[in-house]
Image (cartoon, helix red, strand yellow):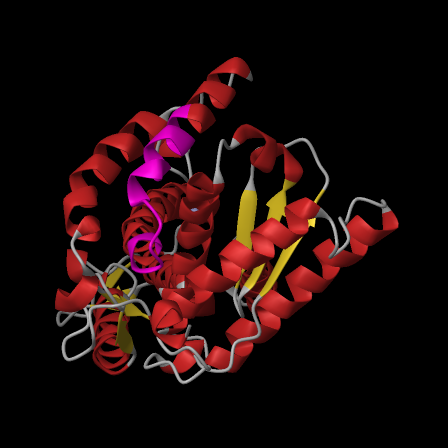
């Protein structure tokens, strides 16, 4: 929903502008011919330009605009993700990202209240999720009292809600708002497993994955508009961008798994508890008959995730001193008690 709405809106705006551009008064044929063709050095009139690189006189300017624009944006707007050190393009401000998250969270919360599905703060599920979530999020902010070293994590007001719905799912929105469904909690066996799930969600916030996805939608749209303008052909924007964005979404999920394992270990939970969680999620999917091929999915299939989690576990289980040079090799929450 977050990914596709701005894309559709902007696509519609682009289509509207194109239609406006064709609404001109009728031209005499000679004028039309002059405007469509060109006259060569011997004075012969051609209907089309003859150079392949100047099919409509727009290819080279199009490439130049795209190249210069991309280089400027690429060199000035990249950020490094904590822990994995991957650099990604972000064109959304921290405030915009948080506002986006607050809107979605408010909507989900209001719907849950209306449907009487929001578990109260005193419910054992809510208390458990909040206790574990607070412990994990303190690690992610990397500063027990909101003095984190990552600017977008500073001063976040983390919230953890439990919605009484029979689905094995949890999600997070920017600004540190996490929703867990009771169906997932019923599937988990212990607090260690819950900690790995919450670590994965918190990792999405730490890595600004939503901002990255919104940025990608914007850049893909700009790319397609330039390409369509250059080639003069309609392109299947939804299909191509959908495939590319699904592939990227799987990459981000894998990254959140990797960062989450480290966060869980830093908070003194057992990161290997994520393996049985993935096994159970895979079994639940199989039971529900969910057979979408991996290349169309926003998340990798559970067997792929388990393989990658096992490969990442040794690094996560090492004490995180190598990840946080100069800091005591003891989790922050433990130092405060
Ligand atoms: Zn995720």
Question: Quick check: 175 above or below 136?
Answer: below
Badge count: 0
Res 18 → quadrant: bottom right
Q: Which residue lies furthest to the front in this view?
A: 337
Residue 304 appears in which quarter of the rendering?
top left
Q: In this view, does 294 lie above or below 274?
A: above
Image quarter in which the C terminus is found: bottom left
**Res 96 → quadrant:** bottom right
Using residue 90 as the reference point, say whether residue 94 is left or right of it. Answer: right
Q: Is residue 159 left or right of residue 120?
A: left
- Point 33% across, 43% down: residue: 247
Q: Where does the image place residue 1, in percent across and percent down from the top left?
A: 59, 51
Horizontal relation, residue 275 to residue 236: left or right: left
Pick whichever, 72 or 197, lies toward us.
Answer: 197
Q: Nearer the viewer, residue 24 or 130?
A: 130
Answer whether residue 29 is visible to the viewer in this image: no
Instruction: Tell me which segment is drawn in magenta.
Output: 264-279
Q: Residue at x 22, y 78 (%)?
A: 68
Task: Say whether residue 138 is visible.
Answer: yes
Is the stretch drawn in magenta largely helix, strand or loop? Answer: helix
Q: Eyeballing the image, is 234 above or below 332?
A: above
| Image position, residue 279 (x, y; %) | 38, 25
Q: Nearer the viewer, residue 303 or 297?
A: 303
x%, y% of residue 17?
Answer: 57, 68
Q: Does the magenta stretch include residue 267?
A: yes
Q: Position of residue 204 (x, y in %)?
A: 41, 58
| Residue 291 shown in magenta | no
For the point 27% across and 75% down, which residue is it? 78
């Amino acid at each position: 929903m977050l990914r596709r709405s701005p894309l559709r809106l902007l696509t519609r705006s682009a289509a509207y502008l194109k239609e406006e551009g064709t609404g001109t008064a009728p031209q005499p044929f000679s004028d039309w011919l002059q405007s469509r063709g060109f006259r060569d050095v011997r004075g012969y009139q051609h209907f089309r330009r003859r150079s392949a690189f100047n099919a409509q006189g727009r290819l080279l300017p199009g490439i130049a605009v795209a190249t210069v624009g991309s280089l400027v944006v690429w060199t000035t707007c990249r950020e490094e993700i904590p822990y994995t050190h991957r650099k990604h393009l972000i064109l959304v401000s921290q405030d915009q990202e948080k506002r986006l998250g607050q809107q979605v969270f408010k909507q989900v919360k209001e719907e849950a209240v209306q449907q009487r599905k929001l578990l109260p703060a005193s419910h054992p599920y809510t208390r458990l999720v909040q206790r574990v979530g607070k412990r994990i999020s303190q690690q992610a902010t990397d500063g027990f009292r909101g003095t984190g070293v990552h600017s977008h994590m500073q001063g976040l007001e983390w919230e953890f809600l439990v919605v009484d719905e029979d689905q094995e799912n949890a999600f997070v929105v920017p600004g540190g708002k996490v929703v867990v469904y009771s169906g997932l909690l019923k599937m988990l066996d212990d607090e260690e497993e819950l900690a790995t799930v919450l670590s994965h969600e918190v990792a999405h916030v730490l890595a600004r994955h939503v901002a990255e996805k919104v940025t990608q939608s914007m850049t893909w749209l700009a790319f397609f508009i330039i390409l369509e303008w250059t080639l003069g052909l309609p392109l299947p924007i939804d299909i191509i961008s959908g495939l590319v964005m699904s592939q990227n979404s799987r990459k981000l999920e894998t990254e959140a798994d990797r960062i989450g394992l480290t966060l869980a270990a830093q908070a003194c939970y057992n990161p290997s508890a994520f393996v049985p969680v993935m096994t159970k999620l895979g079994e639940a999917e199989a039971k529900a008959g969910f057979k979408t091929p991996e290349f169309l999915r926003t998340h990798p299939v559970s067997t792929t995730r388990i393989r990658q989690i096992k490969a990442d576990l040794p690094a996560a289980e090492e004490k995180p001193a190598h990840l946080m040079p100069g800091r005591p090799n003891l989790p922050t929450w433990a130092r405060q008690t």
